[in-house]
Image: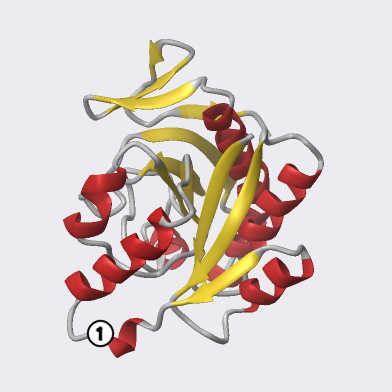
Amino acid sequence: MKRIVVLISGSGSNLQAIIDACSAGFIEGRIQAVISNKADAFGLERAKRAGIATDVIDHKSFANRESFDDELLKKVQAHEPDLIIMAGFMRILTPNFITPLLGKMINIHPSLLPKYTGLNTHQRAIDAGEDEAGATVHFVTEELDGGPPVLQTVVPILEGDDASALAARVLQQEHTIFPLVAKWFCEGRLNLDNGRAILDGEILPSTGLIHSN
């Protein structure tokens, strides 16, 4: 069983999907801890209900990003994780945290990367007249939302969609693809090698695989 640490900042719906997948045996892993930078994140309650250890590291208590990341790294490494899952963790991480854990971290971003890195992805896709949106699970590197994609889900943008309606449909699909990528990693099928995502010994395309919904 692989050891997993999950980082969150909010409600934790993707965390819940990971918890459920571990409980069902879909992911061959155990969540050792859930760590949040916000004490009021509802994801902490989800973790407690599942009997998972929690911790809060308030980024506002630190003078700069580097000192926060140093403390976060210490807390994460104490659990000796094989995999770190960033499930709605809304902090831009520095090399202080990323470099020691490179290849062990995955994140989900609500766009079809490399399009629309950063925030407000759904509104930006609508404003640009896109026909489709989606989400991407990718390895975390020092480039913001720029690590190699592993798996994408595509969701059509419907006539009359606003950002919240689109986000809700995308989120449903996130709950499928995020546990699937975690499953691959915990089975030893997925790894990061020289900046490339490798699945079953094959280099993945630059935008990752497309999940058939």
Which quadrant is home to the N terminus? Answer: top right
Residue 131 visible from this viewpoint:
no
The outermost residue toward the front is 78
For disc 1, the marked residue is 62
Instruction: Tell me which corner region of the image, top left, top right, bottom left or bottom right, holds residue 102.
Output: top left
Can you say whether 179 is above or below 6 in the image?
Answer: above
Residue 83 visible from this viewpoint:
yes
In the image, is 85 to the left or to the right of 128? Answer: right
**Residue at (59, 46) in percent of width and height:** 156
Helix, strand or loop at disc 1? loop
Can you say whether 200 is above or below 73 in the image?
Answer: above
In the image, is 187 to the left or to the right of 83? Answer: right
Between residues 107 and 25, which one lies in front from this camera angle?
Answer: 25
Q: Where is residue 91 in the image (x, y as percent from the top left)?
A: 34, 69
Between residues 170 and 32, which one lies in front from this camera angle?
Answer: 32
Between residues 112 and 71, which one lies in front from this camera angle?
Answer: 71
